[in-house]
Amino acid sequence: MSELMKGLKRTHKATELSEGNINEEVVVMGWVNKKRIFRQHIFITIRDVSGIIQVVFDETKVDKAMFDKANSIKGEYVIAVKGVVSARTEENLNLEMKTGKIEVVPSELRILAESDPLPFSPADVGVKDDLRLKYRYIDLRRPDLQNNFITRAKMAQSVREFYSNEGFIEFETPILLKSTPEGARDYLVPSRIHNGKFYALPQSPQTLKQILMVSGFDRYFQIVKCFRDEDLRADRQPEFTQIDTECSFVDVEDIIDINERLVQKLFKDILNYEVTLPINQMKYEEAMEKYGSDKPDIRFDVFINDITDVVKGSEFEFFEGVIKDGGSIRAIVAPSGNSLPRKQIDSLVLTAKDNGAKGLAWINIADDGAVKSTISKFFTDEQLKNIAKSVNAQNGDLILICADQTEKALNALGAVRVDLGKRLSLYDPKDFKFVWITEFPLLEWSEEDNRFAAKHHPFTMAMDEDIALFDSDPSAIRAKAYDLVINGYEVGGGSIRISSQELQQKMFKALGFSEEEAQDRFGFLLDAFKYGVPPHGGLAFGFDRLVMILTGTEDIRDVIAFPKVKDASCLLTNAPDVVEDSQLDELGLNIIKSNEEEK
């Protein structure tokens, strides 16, 4: 034990104390949250992970040395106080505090650690993110963040309890793996022993969990770190945590049943919120057509409409050109959107452009039914009102129109729809809406590579009735894949896997892999599949995103203890950083500097 604490042992955390402890002698320890001096009294609130408790030093009742020591204490000093719990006087009650009816009258005070002036107070709300992340240990003293991580720990316990009770076996899979480039970029680790060769950090334990099914373990899970070298955003980090699962002898409905029951348990355990099962399912095609997204936020009923036939034959050459080129004209209605100022409408146009569209046209319907539009010179008022009627727009609404290739128009309006939901407060932020998205395309065309890529991964099973399309129309094949979406966030996704060698070869062929390339990338899995592979499938939850949703934050950094910033660097530790030349020599690496760095 530290000399500073010798003979003194903490008896309670701050908010473990209540009126039931009055007249008890206790020892509390923590950080000085606030100090106030009022006449002959010094009031100090001590903060620990549970909350705060007030200690009162009365100059007439404590010895001078203790009072002087209390007077010398500054914010964020770490202190220990021994004393008796006392009821507060009527005028000193603070019912906003959990311990607002009691206080501690001290008999002993020890300063366990002093503190330099902080670069910011944990209570400050206007501190820049970069400063908070540089001094993350101070930022993490915020009660809201501490509650996030307490919730995260409870969720992990709940997950382990659920899967263990369902007969799943928890595994740990390696962090140093073979690179199998598919999807995001790998993080590579050079090998010192095998000069010129590299490990890859896992984007997912996908191939290994399938091998565990071949090994006969039947049900696997782990809470695992994964790594992807990709551009960051509010709900994405380069290293993240998955709840990873795999099962043998199952089909789609089995996987969905197991995992929606996990979600039901998590919401009950953490928020005491009842999730009604079964969760509704929506096909991918419907999600894209109605919401412009494969992760639709279904808390509000604003839908995308196809108005191609309504505007066809107009004098607007741009619309006509899009239609002639095989595109379509899509529209959404912003309820009571005519109240939006022009600046906000321009911001919605920018949202559309940021998501691939050339822009947006709009029709503003006044409260008296009069119409005003950016395309008025190409359409009569009667034609504009006809468009409004076709999308069920009412007086006071705003219609937003996108003309482009259909996929681009849907994606753009999907993003605008989400933007509108926030701007117009179209949903209750405390509400939860759940939906399974199913029957994804198995393949998507990559313009960059001029070939098909796997929508999920190369081991995803096709719908039984679509298998014949491998030989005639691969783009039309639907996958036995499923994503769980909550409030517009994809929180989990998976698929039934290919368990037939013949079908796996068809998949690789559709992806443009030769047999040699497939063997080079995935040979260890393909070899395992020669020795009796059961039908199997799985699902992985984004654990960080689940924690975001259950704690009510929109920033993934609020639920990761030591997150990276947008350029994937850590402001706390200055990672990544240069290493010594001797380390590079051992690895056979030579750093080639850019011209700018040389200068």
Image (cartoon, grey):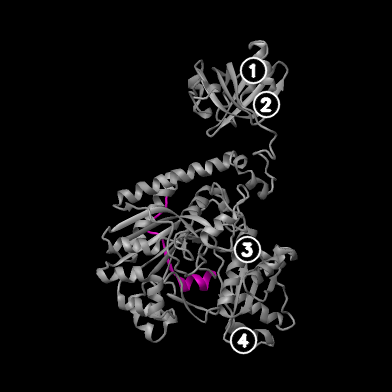
- Using a 10 Å C-alpha cutoff, classify the residue at mark 3 as few (fewer than 14 neighbours), some (14 to 19) or many (20 or more): many
Q: SS of the residue at dot 2?
A: strand
Residue 113 picture location, percent across and down: 61, 28
Q: In which quarter of the image is residue 87?
A: top right
For disc 4, the marked residue is: 312
Q: Quadrant of residue 58?
A: top right
For disc 1, the marked residue is: 57
Residue drawn at x 47%, y 69% is 181
Check if residue 124 falls in the magenta segment: no
Foreground: 356 or 71?
Answer: 71
Residue 487 picture location, percent across and down: 51, 58
Q: Give the range drawn in magenta.
A: 274-291
Q: Which amino acid does label 3 sit on?
A: Leu
Q: SS of the residue at dot 4?
A: loop
Find residue 420 and name its label.
Answer: 3
Foreground: 450 or 577?
Answer: 577
Q: Which of marks 1 and 3 is nearer the N terminus?
A: 1
Q: Which of marks 4 and 2 is nearer the N terminus?
A: 2
Q: SS of the residue at dot 1?
A: strand
Residue drawn at x 60%, y 71% is 413
For disc 2, the marked residue is: 35
The CA span between labels 4 and 2 is: 72 Å
Q: Which of marks 2 and 1 is nearer the N terminus?
A: 2
Q: Can residue 277 be seen in this view?
A: no
Q: What residue type is labelled 1?
A: Phe
The CA span between labels 2 and 3 is: 45 Å
The CA span between labels 4 and 1 is: 81 Å
